[in-house]
Image (cartoon, helix red, strand yellow):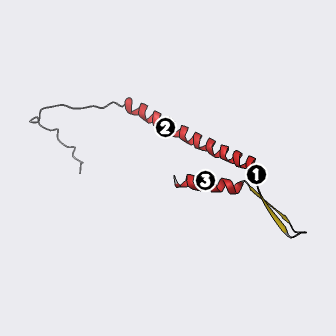
Amino acid sequence: MRKLIFLAPALLLGACQVTEDKANDQMTVSYNEEVAKDAGATALNTVDQAAGAIVNDAKEATAEVRNLDVDVRVGNKNEAKPAAPANSN
């Protein structure tokens, strides 16, 4: 969330164009709305692609969990437990 807060000012700064006229000792700063729109659209597209990838990963994980086979051994508590292997620690 913090990254998104810093994104807006960065986009605004990216849309500023600075020109320097050394002959007249002047500097002009202008805001290009079209550049800001393009940068905003690019950022939103990137966020949309990332969200889509996350959704796809979640769907794949859900499908894997649904297809998971679990073997459950049900027995009597008084039944003897199998002996542990000789090398078990």
Q: Tell me what residue is drawn at x 53 percent, y 55 percent.
A: 2
Task: Determine whether, in the image, residue 84 is placed left or right of residue 60.
Answer: left
Residue furthest to the bottom in view is 25
- Does 71 appear above or below 14? above
**On residue 32, which mark appears?**
1
Given residues 61 and 38, the one toward you in this image is 38
Residue furthest to the left in view is 78
| Distance Cα–Cα, label 2 vs label 3 | 26 Å
Q: Secondary structure at mark 3?
A: helix
**On residue 57, which mark appears?**
2
| Nearer mark to the viewer, of 3 and 1 | 1
**On residue 7, which mark appears?**
3
Q: Secondary structure at mark 2?
A: helix
Disc 3 marks which amino acid? Leu
Q: Position of residue 88 (x, y in %)?
A: 24, 48
Task: Determine whether, in the image, residue 52 is placed left or right of residue 88.
Answer: right
